[in-house]
Amino acid sequence: MTGWTTHLARPDEPDAEVLLREYMSEMVRRWYGRPERPGEVDAALAEMPSDDLAPPTGLLVLARHHGRLAGCAGLRWQLGWAELTRVYVRPAHRGAGGGAALLAAVEACAGDAGAGRIRLDTRSDLVEARGLYARHGYREIPAFNAGPYAQHWFEKSLPARVDDMAAPR
């Protein structure tokens, strides 16, 4: 993961908006198997907004590779767990460890927030994403939601933190 840095950002910051639009553009192209048409990305962004990827409901991590804006991943807080969403690495940076860097960053954030596990849903056509999750310890589980694009569901348990173990229950 050499050359990768991550930081928290709000989804309405310019760099975040650029990456979230690129993410959604790719999702539209892959879903339909063709270039996106005028208005489709805007409609998808409206259907699946990312404004909740900010405190208190979530967070958004941006990644840079050798200083260049390269990817993002978000978390939505649930009771006792976190939902992973919007994992995206720009094509020019794929294959260089960006997915692993983003997963490490969001897993650390989730653990710091007290989440015991991370869950996500993804689509069948996102083969690379499913492979990434499996390589990083996410296991397929039964459906936990009925999202219109959810076709595979994954979960990863996060290690208990030492200070959490010492806290009275």
Image: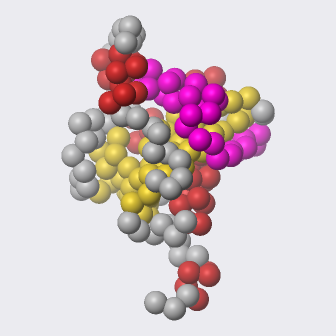
Is residue 164 positioned above or below 78 on the image?
Answer: below
First to last magenta residue range: 1-27
Locate the N terminus by quadrant: top right
User: What residue sits 52% from the left and 23% below the top?
Assistant: 22
18 inside magenta stretch: yes
User: What residue sits 73% from the left and 43% below the top?
Assistant: 5
| Along the viewing direction, whichever of 71 and 58 lies nearer the viewer | 58
| Along the viewing direction, whichever of 17 and 70 lies nearer the viewer | 17
- The image shows residue 26 at horizontal and vertical percentages of 44, 22
Residue 94 visible in the picture: no
Q: Is residue 97 left or right of residue 34?
A: right
57 inside magenta stretch: no
- Among the 4 quarters of the image, the one containing residue 142: bottom left
User: How is the protein colored in the picture?
Assistant: secondary structure
- The image shows residue 68 at horizontal and vertical percentages of 73, 29
User: What residue sits 40% from the left and 27% below the top?
Assistant: 45
| Along the viewing direction, whichever of 17 and 131 lies nearer the viewer | 17
- Among the 4 quarters of the image, the one containing residue 52: top left
- The image shows residue 133 at horizontal and vertical percentages of 46, 48
- The image shows residue 72 at horizontal and vertical percentages of 57, 38
